[in-house]
Amino acid sequence: MLSKLQEHFSNLEDPRQRSKVSHELHDILLVFLVGVICGADGWEAIEEVGKSKLELLKKYGSFENGIPVHDTIARVISSLCSKTLQSSFISWMKDAQTMSDGDVIAVDGKTVRRSFDKKSKRNAIHMVSAFSCANGVVMGQLKTDDKSNEIKAIPDLLNLLDIEGQIVTIDAMGCQKNIAKAIRAKGADYVLAVKGNQGSLQQAIRDYFQIAMDSDFSCVEHQHYEEVEYGHGRIEKRRYWVTSHIESIRDITQKWQDIQSIGLVESTRIIGEKESIERRYYITSLAPDVHEFSKAVRSHWAIENQLHWVLDVTFKEDESRIRRNNAAENLTVMRHITLNLLKAEKSCKKGIKAKRFKAALDSDYVEKVLQTVF
């Protein structure tokens, strides 16, 4: 029986001449995966992890010629087609995850800062990821040429995902008419932040809510919700408003696919004697439900706290100087796979960093982590 790793990643073509192959591609991928699970952040470290976990690895691969040297691992991984690797990852996640209607899928981009290469005049890679906030896992990702090209990459990524019945949240960069249309075409709803890149729309929504607030919403049917958080020496109060009475905003229903509501979030933060107030504006295809709206807005930050922050702090992604050919992009995908596997393993109740350290020390624990792909 094929493992899920073999089944979903079988489309990857081995870039080597068959007559010169001493280590199967499946084995190299497996060493690479286990190395990253165990905390390795470079080719030599991955080779050393492979040597220490050889008996475990032989349960899942042939390894007739032992563990490949780090140069072989680097050369093969760097030469793999990144698009195929990403589509294989998405295929695996469709099989591995069960989504419920109304789950929030947060979409956002992240630059791998040290992946630039001055010699070859290559910019740092920028990856757009889709993150399931309910399950805490990455659903898929695509590379863009730079941050400005998120607008093109987001519809392409959404087209690869099964998001029917979900709520897609995107920050202001993704507040585009074609993206809203693409989300609705996939049977999902959207909650899009509105900022300066949609200046006229932002101003219209700002004016709308300001007039409504000046009259204490006396003439506007709406829903309102408040929450207060205390901690770390600060008080944060968030107030949410949502309304479907948007006919007075010029052309909004004609320009934005299936738009039903607009929303306002006012955050008041108090630290000592200092107070700051921030207002954020949103458009959504959801019917007005302030609790559903507030959940979507809050959930979006999970992609920063549970994905981007973990990649930088635990996986040290921004410090990685691996940049050979497709290596930086492929290593980013492997970090996402590792993060998903470690989150899926529930017997250890500690954080991702502690789980990786435990994996490095305990082969039995690595085997538990691998069960999702075997």
Image (cartoon, rainbow, N blue to C red):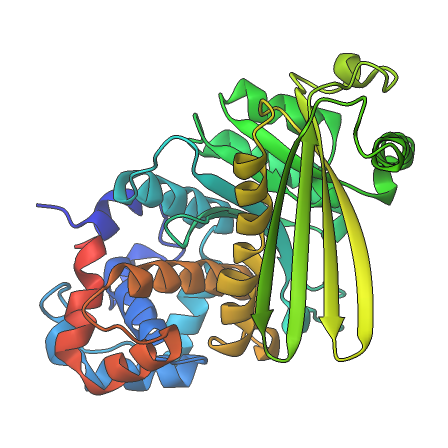
Residue 36 image offset from top left, x and y in percent: 36, 73
Seen at 49% across and 70% down, the residue is 310
Residue 248 point in image, percent of width and height? 86, 16
Quadrant including the N terminus: top left
| Mark count | 0
On-image quarter of the C terminus = bottom left
User: Residue 236 appears in which quarter of the rendering?
Assistant: bottom right
Q: Nearer the viewer, residue 229 or 316?
A: 229
Residue at 50% in and 42% down = 105
Q: From this viewpoint, is residue 23 visible?
A: yes
Q: Is residue 368 above or below residue 71?
A: above
Left or right placement of residue 341 versus residue 103 in this view: left
Q: Is residue 64 visible?
A: no
**Residue 151 place in picture, x, y as percent:** 71, 39
Please report the residue visible at 47 percent of the width from the left and 50 percent of the height from the top: 81
Q: Nearer the viewer, residue 235 or 128?
A: 235
Observer-nearest of 154 and 137: 137
Q: Quadrant of residue 48?
A: bottom left
Relative vertical location of residue 40 with respect to residue 278 in this rendering, above or below: below
Foreground residue among 346 and 153:
346
What's the residue at 33%, 81% (across, down)? 354
| Vertical arrangement, residue 255 with respect to residue 188, above or below | above
Q: Is residue 139 left or right of residue 65?
A: right
Q: Position of residue 242 (x, y in %)?
A: 67, 32
